[in-house]
Amino acid sequence: MPVGARPEFEGTLRNVSRLRIDARQTCLKGSPLACRLTTDGRLTVLLSDGRRLALPAGRHTGTITR
């Protein structure tokens, strides 16, 4: 990873109520994950290491930690 880089993702999701990310396959197990998401409805982000983030519709910026 380049200096200053961090695990993060961003996107706009439509008609999606649940997003699952395999933390081991993406090398994110136990690591903070920054996100910027826009969604048109309620969204639950699930990481396979047990982390969970529930969001209402709208724009969201933050970090998923343990």
Image (tube, rainbow, N blue to C red):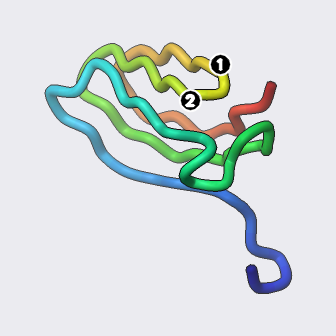
Q: Residue furthest bottom?
A: 2
User: Is 27 located above or below residue 43 in the figure?
Assistant: below
User: Is 53 located above or below residue 2 in the figure?
Assistant: above
Which mark, residue 15? none
Left or right: where 48 falls relative to 64: left
Quadrant of the rendering where the C terminus is positioned = top right
**What is the CA distance from the residue labelled 2 to the residue labelled 1?**
6 Å
- Percent across and percent down for residue 15 are 15, 27
Left or right: where 35 falls relative to 49: left
- Percent across and percent down for residue 59 are 44, 35
Q: Residue furthest front?
A: 25
Q: Residue furthest left?
A: 15
- Judged from the image, the secondary structure of the residue bearing numbered disc 2 is strand
Q: Residue furthest right?
A: 3
Residue type at mark 1 is Gly
User: Is 40 located above or below residue 26 in the figure?
Assistant: above
Query: Which residue in the protein does label 1 denote?
Result: 50
Left or right: where 43 falls relative to 4: left
Answer with the quarter of the image where residue 57 lies: top left
Residue type at mark 2 is Leu
Q: Are marks 2 and 1 in contact (CB under 8 Å)?
A: yes
Between 52 and 26, the one nearer to me in the picture:
26
Answer with the quarter of the image where residue 16 lies: top left
